[in-house]
């Protein structure tokens, strides 16, 4: 979302949401520090969770006892839990938690060297990263825990891989906040599996909300590579650029097919979701003609 809509759009979402909860607080915002403090109050009001770290500082939690308090929030047995996320994160202590914490901290430092805007937004939106093991996945986010990322990187990952992982999860949170402000979907219509489309990340049929998220995230990663990090030869977190471009193209075509089906599309995407979808398509078209990405074809 940051590279597709700009940092001002993300700050605007935060200020609007803070103002909807507390208009007087929003009127008094004069700095990013003010926003970071008010955002924590917003989370406490909305989700009854008080971030324990200082405003503008992302805590990385290695304690299994504290991490498992977050794990319970990530357990989701809803009808839209199509990939059985509830069984992904293990409750036991991660014996490599200290090494993983060090890797995450080094990646965040590296991210600041490449893009100060990414680092400022990350430290504003993401309040906590908790580390717990899994044999299935490497990271995750949920709208039930705004500002919280579960992370499980392999300790041999490069810093660029971990940066991609962190930007991936940040983008999900930007989408959560954007949806809180604007509303994106009609979830009742989305339960019909005939309306599912192909994900740009997992490359399997999924509900349209998750597919739009995947297309936004994948496009953000491609833009991150094109504009900031460079295109990796053997990436560990996401597919190589050519394959990821192919997946995004297939995902966009799959969503288009559903959204233009008169019998299936009624009301699934609200106006803002369509606006984001069209923005992703424009970014994808631009990427097809970017010099570095084009050189890979």
Image (cartoon, grey):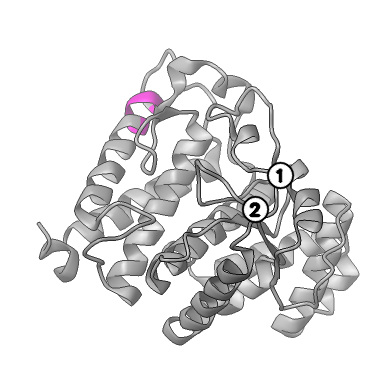
Q: Secondary structure at mark 1?
A: loop
Image location of residue 255, percent across then percent down: 37, 32
Picture coordinates of residue 116, whole percent (x, y) = 51, 83
Q: Which residues are drawn in magenta? A: 255-259
Query: Label 1, on which residue?
Result: 91
Question: Can residue 141 be found in the magenta stretch?
Answer: no
Q: Is residue 231 above or below residue 297?
A: below
Dominant secondary structure (helix, strand or loop) of the stretch shown in magenta: helix
| Circle 1/circle 2 CB separation < 8 Å | yes
Q: Residue at x 46, y 41 (%)?
A: 212
First of labels 1, 2 by sequence position: 1
Query: What residue is drawn where x is 38% and y is 24%?
Result: 258
Badge 1: how crowded within 10 Å, few (<14), some, or many (20+)? some
User: Horizontally, is 156 left or right of 176 in the view?
Assistant: left
Quarter of image, res 235 = bottom left
Hey, which residue is sitting farthest top in the picture? 263
Foreground residue among 268 and 52: 52
Quarter of the image where one finds residue 225: bottom left
Q: Can you tell which quarter of the image residue 185 is in?
A: top right
Instruction: Residue at 39%, 36% (x, y): give it.
Output: 199
* Residue that mark 2 sits on: 132
């Amino acid at each position: 979302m940051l590279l597709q809509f700009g940092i001002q759009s993300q700050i605007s979402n935060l200020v609007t949401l803070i103002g909807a909860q507390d208009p007087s607080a929003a009127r008094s915002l004069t700095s990013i520090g003010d926003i970071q403090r008010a955002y924590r109050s917003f989370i406490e009001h909305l989700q009854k969770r008080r971030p324990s770290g200082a405003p503008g500082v992302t805590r990385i939690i290695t304690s299994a006892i504290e991490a498992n308090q977050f794990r319970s929030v990530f357990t989701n047995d809803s009808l839209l839990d199509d990939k059985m996320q509830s069984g992904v994160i293990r409750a036991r202590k991660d014996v490599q938690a200290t090494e993983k914490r060090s890797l995450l901290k080094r990646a965040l430092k590296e991210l600041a060297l490449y893009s100060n805007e990414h680092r400022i937004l990350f430290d504003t939106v993401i309040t906590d990263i908790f580390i717990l093991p899994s044999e299935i996945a490497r990271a995750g986010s949920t709208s039930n825990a705004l500002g919280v990322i579960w992370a499980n990187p392999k300790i041999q990952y490069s810093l660029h891989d971990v940066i991609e992982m962190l930007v991936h999860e940040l983008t999900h949170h930007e989408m959560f906040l954007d949806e809180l402000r604007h509303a994106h979907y009609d979830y009742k219509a989305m339960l019909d599996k005939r309306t599912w489309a192909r994900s740009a990340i997992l490359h399997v049929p999924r509900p349209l909300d998750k597919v739009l998220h995947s297309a936004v995230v994948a496009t953000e990663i491609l833009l991150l590579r094109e504009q900031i990090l460079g295109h990796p030869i053997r990436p560990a977190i996401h597919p190589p650029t050519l394959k990821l471009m192919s997946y995004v193209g297939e995902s966009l075509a799959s969503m288009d097919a559903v959204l233009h089906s008169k019998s299936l599309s009624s009301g699934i995407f609200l106006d803002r979701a369509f606006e984001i979808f069209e923005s992703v398509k424009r970014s994808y078209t631009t990427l097809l003609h970017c010099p570095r990405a084009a050189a890979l074809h």
